[in-house]
Amino acid sequence: MKTQTKAKAQSKTQYVAITTDVQQVNQQVEKAYTLMVNAATELLKRFDVAKFRTFALMDHSKNEQNTNLVKEFLCYHWNITLSMSPKDGRFYIFIDLGGEAIEKFGSILTNNLLRECYQLTQSTDNTGGIEYALRVNYSPSDSLHNFYYRRIVEGETGYVSIGSVKKEVV
């Protein structure tokens, strides 16, 4: 006896057809990414020096060269990237931590961000949820800062915007 199943609605990317289930999970991952960027931006308000409060936002959907990247937040302290896997179309959030910022300011700032990120991706119903999506990388080299300074010096483009948060008055 043969059974027929209805095909799920799909949208296509350059690499893989994405099911509605994956689209729904991707929306949750993108929402978590946005909340992480908001938390990161809030943490920057405590610095006196403008370079430590400055950030770049990149909308890679406007940049044809980066087909797997979706959005990116870059500051002196971290690089938070929303990307899509070309294999299955699922979104992932990568947080790159630079050694220089941790050496200069200690780990409390980064720990506060990571705590928030883990809470945002944590499953509350004992399922995998979007916990799979968070990937943390540590880079002891200056590659994060080189990327940050290059983005700031190159200035705004069609897909890069640069901003700075105001110092929080205590």
Image (cartoon, grey):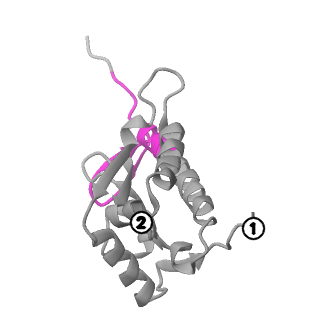
90 or 104: which is nearer to us?
104
Asked if residue 12 can be seen in this view, the reply is: no
Q: Position of residue 71 (x, y in %)?
A: 45, 64
Q: Residue 104 carries which label?
A: 2
Task: Report the residue at 44% width, 37% height from top.
Answer: 130
Q: Position of residue 84 (x, y in %)?
A: 35, 54
Q: Where is residue 170 in the image (x, y as percent from the top left)?
A: 75, 63
Residue furthest top as drawn: 1
Q: What residue type is labelled 2?
A: Lys
Badge 2: few (under 14), some or many (20 or more) residues near its Cα, within 10 Å?
A: few
> Which residue bears the numbered disc 1?
169
On-image quarter of the N terminus: top left
Taking the magenta stretch, the answer to whether it contains residue 127 is: no
Q: Quadrant of residue 61?
A: bottom left
**Who comes first in sequence, dot 1 or dot 2?**
2
Q: Residue 106 carries which label?
A: none
Asked if residue 83 can be seen in this view, the reply is: yes
Taking the magenta stretch, the answer to whether it contains residue 15 is: yes
140 or 24: which is nearer to us?
140
Cα–Cα gap, marks 1 and 2? 22 Å
